[in-house]
């Protein structure tokens, strides 16, 4: 809960309260608009109705907003939370599971329990850290690929809306990448509105009112293995691990147990309302934790707190967004979601295929995850992880000792005092470099 000392930290702040407040609002707006479409696509694929998907979007917005307020006030640190965008992409690629939406909600609860357990049981954190980076990233890339192909496919069904959306995204990638997805969403919304007006399609105004749709969780072993476990792994590997590294780069040490407890309990509480998972923010964390939020690191927590309050306001728009998406031309939601994930796909592929020694196992992991195959009622993400680990083990050099820096074994590094430092240390070399290089894209998460 301390920040590392630096000359910048000792200089008096010259900015007023407006700077961190503005940074917090931008953090929430960029995070929300850049990936809410991914959340809706994932919940819909799991079998949620329009009302249940709207409730799920509201749930993750509220739980992460409240979580940010609690953590920022307690630790006076710009701890930014987000919903699990890679997790939502996983749900979209997995599709309906045995037991339907009720079983999916049960899987969300289990994922939340695992996140809480990670904060208090060091061995579980070490187990997650032991998953090779290239295998975890290859699984994530395979999960993301079908969604990233959606804009291309949507060109055939709704070109009048999709083409301007893609062109806007591409132009902003050149001149203002931070706002590319936000601008693309605005163009898509405008195009959908024009199409709705021209074709005289009916919009359910009553459905725009935000409301909570509660679902009783059911327990299915297929959903636990095929949804809960992969959801937990991608949330930890693609969000919580790089999130701690991003915060460390700005001189903050995340209170690991508190962060895992808040995000895990938030996931559990939000699950019956349709929320899939919340976690530490990774890329968007830099918007509130960096110097642009405030020159004084001790004042940047105001930016993250403001982001939390803004998410609570944005949660009220959940019903209206789902109604717009339901009435919009086919492929519009998928286009926005796919564009939001392209930067993350590129980073995941880079991390997965960079180590030449394990490129084959990473490629196989990627292909199995992208296939969408379901065996024994269990989705492709789980089988991709199994296949990648088995092939990596079979093809390991006979005389080579295990590489501790790649295996992530917690016991091999005496500097690792807890699960947080173990996973953050493992991710610094691969995840954080990619995270900083893509920081303006803000397409990997909310």
Image (cartoon, rainbow, N blue to C red):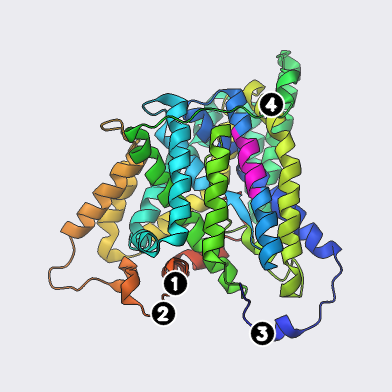
Q: Which residue bears the numbered disc 4?
A: 324
Cβ–Cβ under 8 Å for marks 1 and 2 = yes
Q: Nearer the viewer, mark 4 or mark 1?
A: 1
Looking at the image, is 409 positioned above or below residue 263? below
Magenta span: predominant SS is helix
User: Is 62 colored magenta in this rendering?
Assistant: yes
Q: How busy is the neighbourhood of tag 1: few (under 14 within 10 Å), some, or many (20 plus)?
A: many
Q: According to the image, label 1 marks what residue?
A: 425
Secondary element under disc 1, as helix, strand or loop, is helix
Sequence order check: which comes first, mark 1 or mark 2? 2
Disc 4 to disc 3, C-alpha distance: 48 Å
Spatial separation of the CA atoms under disc 2 and disc 3? 22 Å
Q: How far apart are the alpha carbons under marks 2 and 4?
A: 51 Å
Which residue corresponds to mark 3? Answer: 6
Element on which disc 4 rests: helix
**Marking on residue 409:** none
Disc with the residue nearer the chain's start (2 vs 4)? 4
Query: Residue 392, position in %: x, y?
Result: 23, 58
The mark closer to the camera, 1 or 2, is 2
């Amino acid at each position: 809960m301390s920040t590392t000392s630096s000359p910048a930290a000792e200089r008096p702040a010259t900015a007023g309260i407006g700077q961190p407040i503005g940074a917090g609002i931008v953090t929430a707006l960029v995070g929300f608009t850049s990936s809410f479409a991914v959340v809706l696509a994932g919940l819909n694929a799991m079998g949620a109705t329009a009302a249940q998907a709207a409730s799920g979007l509201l749930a993750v917005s509220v739980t992460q907003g409240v979580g940010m307020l609690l953590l920022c006030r307690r630790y006076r640190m710009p701890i930014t939370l987000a919903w699990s965008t890679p997790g939502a992409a996983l749900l979209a690629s997995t599709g309906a599971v045995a037991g339907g939406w009720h079983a999916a909600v049960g899987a969300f609860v289990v994922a939340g329990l695992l996140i809480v357990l990670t904060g208090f049981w060091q061995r579980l954190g070490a187990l997650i850290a032991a998953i090779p980076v290239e295998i975890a990233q290859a699984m994530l890339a395979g999960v993301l690929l079908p969604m990233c192909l959606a804009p291309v496919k949507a060109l055939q069904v709704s070109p009048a809306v999709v083409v301007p959306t893609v062109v806007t995204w591409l132009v902003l990638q050149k001149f203002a990448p931070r706002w590319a997805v936000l601008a693309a969403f605005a163009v898509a919304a405008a195009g959908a509105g024009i199409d709705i007006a021209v074709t005289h399609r009916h919009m359910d105004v009553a459905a725009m009112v935000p409301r909570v749709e509660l679902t009783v969780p059911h327990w299915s072993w297929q959903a636990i293995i095929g949804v809960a476990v992969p959801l937990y792994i991608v949330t930890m590997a693609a969000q919580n691990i790089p999130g701690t590294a991003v915060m460390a780069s700005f001189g903050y040490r995340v209170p690991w147990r508190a962060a895992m407890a808040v995000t895990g309990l938030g996931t559990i509480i939000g699950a019956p309302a349709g929320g899939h998972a919340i976690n530490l923010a990774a890329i968007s964390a830099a918007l509130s934790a960096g110097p642009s939020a405030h020159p004084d690191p001790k004042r940047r927590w105001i930016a993250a707190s403001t982001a939390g309050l803004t998410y609570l306001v944005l949660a009220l728009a959940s019903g209206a967004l789902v109604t717009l998406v339901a009435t919009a031309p086919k492929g519009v939601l998928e286009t926005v979601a796919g564009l939001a994930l392209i930067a993350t796909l590129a980073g995941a592929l880079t991390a997965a295929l960079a180590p030449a020694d394990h490129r084959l196992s990473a490629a196989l992991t990627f292909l199995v995850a992208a296939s969408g195959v379901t065996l024994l009622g269990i989705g492709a993400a789980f089988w991709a992880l199994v296949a990648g680990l088995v092939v990596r083990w079979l093809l390991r050099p006979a005389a080579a000792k295990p590489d501790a820096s790649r295996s992530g074994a917690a016991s091999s590094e005496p500097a690792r005092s807890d699960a947080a430092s173990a996973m953050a240390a493992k991710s610094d070399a691969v995840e954080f470099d990619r995270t900083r290089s893509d920081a303006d894209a803000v397409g990997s998460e909310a």
